[in-house]
Image (cartoon, helix red, strand yellow):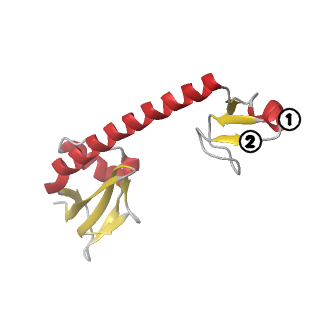
Amino acid sequence: MEIILREDVDKLGQRGDMVKVAAGYARNFLLPRNLAVAATESNKKIVEQQRQAHLRRDAKLVTEAQELAKMMGAVSVTIHQKAGENDQLFGSVTSTDVAVALEKLGYTIDRKKVHLEEPIKTLGDFQVSVRLHKDVSIDVPVHVVKEE
């Protein structure tokens, strides 16, 4: 039986793929769980329209992310933290702290899009990657200074 997947299915395919499966697998597992639809002509047209709409929407998001990356090109973030004698921070600077600092500068970025290898635990200058879209990311300089 030929079906069109509505969701990603392990070991079978990704959303929008047209695959052949055993009739029982389709009837008893995929169709009742709404993971797939039968590959009729009308369903093929609907899936193709959805795919085109998704591509247009994704292209628009990429363009917006690239524009935001250009605007953020000269941005640097300064974070004030309490520190001990040998420049060790009391606590650490996390992705949430960087996202809040960016928001104070007028850029609303979700903390999950700020990528730190590990939390920053010392004073100094660091490069933090901010992923604006799956295809667009930017490095933002972060300066951690001692709070007076």
Q: Residue at x 36, y 54 (%)?
A: 95
Instruction: Report if residue 121 is visible in the image.
Output: yes
Tag shown at residue 20:
2
Residue 24, position in %: x, y? 86, 35
Residue that sits furthest to the front in the current view: 41
Residue 85, position in %: x, y? 24, 75
Residue 25, position in %: x, y? 82, 38
Image quadrant assignment for residue 65: top left
Tag shown at residue 83:
none
Q: Nearer the viewer, residue 55 or 62?
A: 55
Quadrant in the picture for the C terminus: bottom left
**Taking 70 as reference, is 114 left or right?**
right
**Taking 83 as reference, is 17 left or right?**
right
Amino acid at circle 1: Gly
Q: Residue at x 27, y 70 (%)?
A: 84
Amino acid at circle 2: Lys
Image quadrant assignment for residue 126: bottom left
Q: Which residue is mark 1?
A: 24
Instruction: Report if residue 108 is visible in the image.
Output: no
Residue 135, position in %: x, y? 36, 52
Residue that sits furthest to the top in the current view: 42
Q: Nearer the viewer, residue 98 or 28?
A: 28
Q: In the rendered image of this protein, does residue 126 appear above or below residue 136? A: below
Dot 1: element: helix
| Residue density around tag 2, few if under 14, some if 14–19, many if 20 or more, within 10 Å | few
Q: CA distance from mark 1 to mark 2?
A: 12 Å
* Viewer-side label of 1, 2: 2
